[in-house]
Image (cartoon, rainbow, N blue to C red):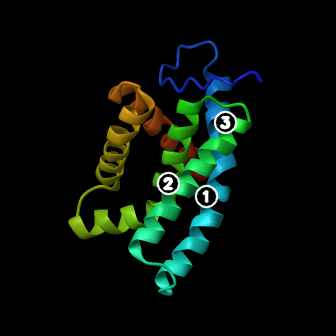
Amino acid sequence: METKGLALQSNSRSQNAPKENHMSKNMLELVLPRIARVLSKQLKSYKAGRMDDETFSTNFDSILQQQCEWLNNQGYQTADSAITVHAALIVLSSPGLKEEAKRLNVPLEVIEFRAICESSKELAESIGEPLFEVVEKLSCLIAFRLKSKNS
């Protein structure tokens, strides 16, 4: 199976930029509803007391792994799949991030960037990519999502 490369470069001079931007947006749009649906069920069980912290954490990690594997089975590269799943989590965490920004009285972008950096540290190590590249790719995916959502 041929893998679909995902170049999430912020360099707008690239001849392939529109196609790359479209592809990354498509990956995120593919995985967002899948993760949201499954996590919603898990959160309801957790909040209802049917699941303890350890079980929730284990299930959460399993859900993320399943989504990465699903994207891999769709032909996307492993690193790109992992980055996309983490971007989806940050997007889905948006209400909590907004709440935190309000509570701390700082711009939302500061909180979003903190979330991106925290996610990127662990992710860069696990997929073997430089931290700055993972931060850039996550930032681009989230920016694409916000741009498309506000268009």
Check disc 3: other Cα within 10 Å, few if <14, some if 14-19, many if 20+. some
Q: Which residue is mark 3?
A: 72
Can you say whether 151 is above or below 124 in the image? below
Q: Which mark is residue 89?
A: 2
Q: Nearer the viewer, residue 34 or 108?
A: 34
Mark 2 → mark 3, Cα distance in angstroms = 18 Å
Which amino acid, mark 2? Leu
Q: Secondary structure at mark 2?
A: helix
Residue found 47% across the figure and 62% down from its top: 58
- Residue 76 place in picture, x, y as percent: 66, 31
Decide which of tag 2 and tag 3 comes sooner along the chain.
3
Q: Which mark is residue 35?
A: 1
Decide which of tag 2 and tag 1 comes sooner along the chain.
1
Residue found 52% across the figure and 74% down from its top: 43
Looking at the image, can residue 148 be seen? Answer: no
Looking at the image, can residue 46 be seen? Answer: yes
Residue found 62% across the figure and 50% down from its top: 66
Decide which of tag 1 and tag 3 comes sooner along the chain.
1
Which image quadrant: the N terminus?
top right
